[in-house]
Amino acid sequence: MPMTGISATPLPQASTEPRIQALRSAADAMEAQFLSEMLKSAGLDQARDSFGGGVGEEQFASFLRQEQASGLARNGGIGLAESIFEALKRRAGDAP
């Protein structure tokens, strides 16, 4: 006996795609920021003598560290982004 008033048609994929992409982007950014802080704690942003040090190197070390962390996250990272993404999807009500 068919149920009345309930649609069996799934929601259009196009309407949720931008939200999913935004959640994925936020999760990736959070993992990159976490990795950046971990690299900072590991001393990656400390000035080295090979480039002469100085104020310029100190100013731009954080940019280098952030790019390295973003690269790590883009290439799989440590899996934190996937966990964050799934949690964000559940919270937003987009989880299956």
Image (cartoon, rainbow, N blue to C red):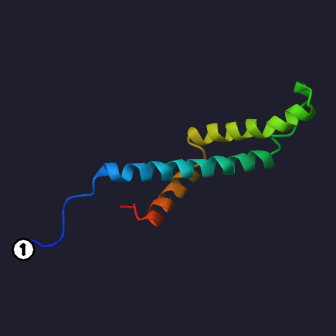
Q: In what quadrant of the picture does the N terminus appear?
A: bottom left
Q: Using residue 6 as the reference point, say whether residue 83 is left or right of it.
A: right
Say which quarter of the image contains residue 46: top right
Rendered position, 7 above or below 30: below
Q: Is residue 6 above or below residue 53?
A: below
Q: Which residue is mark 1?
A: 1
Q: Is residue 22 left or right of residue 54?
A: left
Q: Residue at position x 57%, y 47% from top?
A: 28
Among all residues in the image, which is located at the extreme left?
A: 1
Give percent across and percent down for residue 41. 80, 49
The C terminus sits in image quarter: bottom left
Give x and y (percent) for residue 12. 28, 53
* Residue at 57%, 39% in the rendered image: 74
Indicate the secondary structure of the residue bearing disc 1. loop
Nearest the viewer among 93 and 81 is 93
Q: Three-letter amino acid code at disc 1?
A: Met
| Residue 11 at x, y percent in the picture | 27, 57
Q: Nearer the viewer, residue 78 or 4?
A: 4
Residue at 34% from the left image edge and 52% from the top image edge: 15
Residue in the image at 53% along x and 57% along y:
83
Alpha-carbon neighbours of circle 1 within 10 Å: few (<14), some, or many (≥20)?
few
Total numbered labels placed on residues in the image: 1
